[in-house]
Image (cartoon, rainbow, N blue to C red):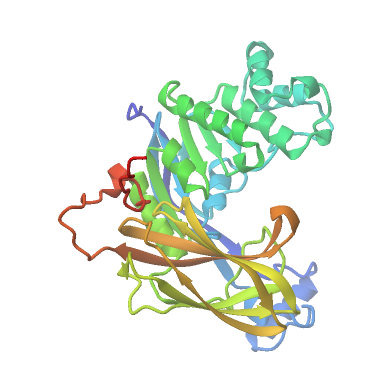
Amino acid sequence: MSENKLMIRVKDVKKQYRLGQIGGGTLRGDLQSWWARKRGKEDPNTLIGTDQRLIGTTFMALNGVSFTVNKGEAVGIIGSNGAGKSTLLKLLTHVTAPTEGDIDLYGRVASMLEVGTGFHPEMTGRENVYLNGAILGMTRAEIDAKMDEIIEFSEVRDFIDTPVKRYSSGMFVKLAFSVAAHLDSEIMIMDEVLAVGDMKFQKKCLTKMRQAAQRDGKTVLYVSHNMATIRDLCDRCIVLDKGKVVFDGEVDEGISIYLATKSKATNYVDYSDFKRDNWFKRDNLRLQTVRLAVSSVESLERTEPVRVEYTFYAQESMENIGLLFEVRDELGNPLAASCLYGLQMKKGENNLTASYDFATLSPGKYSNYFTTVSLGNGGSYAVEDWVPGVQFRIVDTHENENRVEWDAKALGLIQLPDAHLCGEE
């Protein structure tokens, strides 16, 4: 719990980057470039085809960020890609310096911005533990006292004297987290690196981070796109958008604000220019547009089917395609899915309409994702496209005095069909 002892102070922090070519390498080249831009001409020192609008322009990764964090607080930092989360963590860990503003840290910092931060690939796991401890200012005796606990938690005892360049990504993250969690530091800063570990280890890490804040009084900053993890671990949430703090407060409210920027409350979405996440690079089949054939997505009747019209674009003819309509709750947790199987796609534009039954969903607010897959044998599949969908609200206007008034918080978001008495045999 917080003791109101200030551990982190960020005041009016800005971080500016220059886009395009920064320098030509020679004074003569720089003068040529400056004179060309001054006259509105094309820079003679740039490659043919370079977008001249980016030359000499700037980008504000952070633009006036301010907040404080007290001892024992676990603070989640969330936001869309490019919001400034990773830039903020790099400033806090002194990887780079702010353009303007002040950052004050009152304690030793253990950070993990990516898998194996601070590890030397040629050194063994044990040697890297000593290296990280020395960076934090610990003596060899202090590190020796923690060594067995670190090795036991990391689950890599058999490989602790092996150079870490031979570790798998999972082994890397296990040891790196174990080092950050056990060495004597007052502040823990974590980017979303736990996604590399297996599910069992992720749960163990979350428990350790929770204990670090609640029992040991450490200050935890955690960046993640997993809203369930943020809700489980953090007691406060900071939402970044376009380099600014748009919310700082209660976790559930912060998550709702963040998710509102991910999907839209509209019955029509055009994905023609939508930038997909970079975890897959397939473009064989892309969803172009989606339209819900309803007057308003704010009042979808629970007992009535909803028609959805899709437009796809295929680079070539494809068979055995599947389409998943993924339903998620307000926190972004997967809740249910409705699937179409065995679709045929011709080369070029494809149109299809599907009908969905949301009768088992309780009244409330939801969001969704559209996932397009190529189906294989034995239930296997490959993701072709994955895009955020829309926000929609389920309502139930059919009154029935004999039914229980549904409370989603107490009874859940899934409303099963009514039960019926069975006759005696």
Rendered image quadrant of residue 424: top left
The front one of 361 and 157 is 361
Rendered image quadrant of residue 137: top right
- 42 over 187 or under it: above or below: below
Query: In this image, 42 relative to 359: left or right?
Result: right
Q: For the point 71% across and 55% down, which residue is it?
A: 380
- 19 over 423 or under it: above or below: below
Q: For the point 80% across and 69% down, which residue is it?
A: 26
Q: Position of residue 294 (x, y in %)?
A: 37, 78
Asked whether residue 143 is in view, the answer is no
Query: In this image, 268 relative to 313: left or right?
Result: left
Rendered image quadrant of residue 367: bottom left
Q: Where is the N terminus found, in terms of image quarters?
A: top left
Query: In this image, 208 relative to 67: left or right?
Result: right
The front one of 375 and 10 is 375
Q: For the point 28% across and 42% down, which residue is it?
A: 410
Q: Position of residue 93 (x, y in %)?
A: 57, 40
Query: In this image, 106 relative to 27: left or right?
Result: left
